[in-house]
Image (cartoon, rainbow, N blue to C red):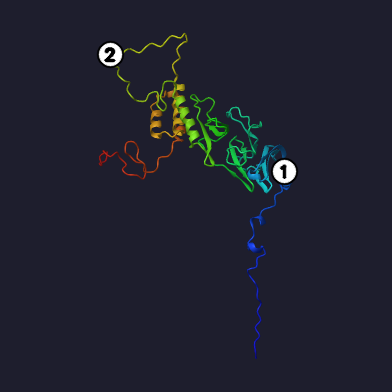
Amino acid sequence: MGVLALSCASDHQVSPWGAARRPTLGAYVAPADLDARLRAIDLEVAELGLSLDVELRGALPRGRGEVVVRGYSGTDALGRRTSAVRVATPRGVVMAAGPLEGARADRRQATQLVPSLLPGSEAAPAHDELGVFRSGTDLNRDDAPDVVLRNEAGELEIWAVHPLGAVRYAVEIATPPRFALDVDRDGLLELAGRVRVPERDPIGPDLLDVASFEGGRYTHRGGAARAFHAARAGEAAGPGKPPGRSKDDGTPPARPKDDAMPPARPKDDGRPPAPPEDDATRLRRALERAWHALLAGRPAEETLAALDREQVPPALREAFAAHRARVAGVAPARPTGAATSDGTRGPGGAPTRPPAASGTPD
């Protein structure tokens, strides 16, 4: 008996995607339709009971289409004001921030649109006015439109918008950024923030930090920010004092030679002499000088030692200690085992005594 073997031949190399043999990215990406994205946003915010406050339009680079930035506001179930931001490109809704709802919502999330960044101080923000540095434009010259948000505490975030998404810029700064400055007058804004000091603080130092845009992020370690701090450290030193030196720097006064001429008397210009600096002003200058010196990259040990040589009256010791701790907090951490100026090392390092110290117990 013969056996008839039947087989079915099939070309398993045939692909439904044609010669490419695999789907292209376009198969997964929605077609470009900005109006459809905006209609989807309209339906969503209507269900949430949000009202449109502002709409801004910008452009994606290389002719990739328009960007629409919208800020909304509303009221939650507890009667609290809420806010939301939606950003759309022809390819999709690339940002959806807010509204915050419920007692468990993280109130630190930024959900309020900042239409425009205006150079100024935290005391007099004017972010809601449209200016040159507005959301939907390229704020840092990296070829991407940017959107600025803030949270309920006034802290700022900046996001870069791309055709298929949005990315938040990293920010390295010693204080939460709440406003913007152009510290080097180059036409680009730096993020800025200052340590909040109680109104009745007896010393009241102005501890300000800035972060410039360098290397794809905002940082206070870049050249523009450090130059700003170096200049401020010099200003805080006061007239006639070198930057980074305290009023009492521990060096003995130079002894005049026997044949030295006595110093010339200052010319009487009719103005009364400046009053002596009070303790609070002196300590405020010393704290600000140390703060800016550390952020300018000057040696922490030397800077803090100069600060610690200041004479602090009993009435100001508590406030000074609190501010001194804040200033020391911006100093870069010493690596484990790094030697100090007297030859000792931190935890995990050896030796733990100066080289000349005895090995016997004290």
Residue at numbered disc 2: 259
What type is the residue that disc 1 sits on? Val
Left or right of residue 216: residue 50: right
Specify whether residue 6 is in view: yes
Residue found 38% across the figure and 32% down from its top = 302
Task: Give the mark nearer the N terminus: 2 vs 1.
Answer: 1
How far from the left and from the top, in percent, is residue 344?
Answer: 33, 39
Residue at numbered disc 1: 45
**Toward the viewer: 261 or 81?**
261
- Mark in the foreground, 2 or 1: 2
Q: Quadrant of residue 123?
A: top right
How many residues crowd around disc 1 within 10 Å: few (fewer than 14), some, or many (20 or more)?
A: some
**Mark 2 and mark 1: Cα distance apart in space:** 86 Å
**Toward the viewer: 44 or 232?**
232
Residue found 42% across the figure and 39% down from its top = 333
Residue found 64% across the figure and 71% down from its top = 11
Q: Quadrant of the N terminus?
A: bottom right
How far from the left and from the top, in percent, is residue 361?
Answer: 26, 41
Numbered disc 2: secondary structure? loop
How far from the left and from the top, in percent, is residue 3?
Answer: 64, 87
Specify whether residue 325 is in view: no
**Furthest residue in direction bottom, as rendered:** 1
Numbered disc 1: secondary structure? helix
Left or right of residue 140: residue 37: right
**Toward the viewer: 173 or 151?**
173
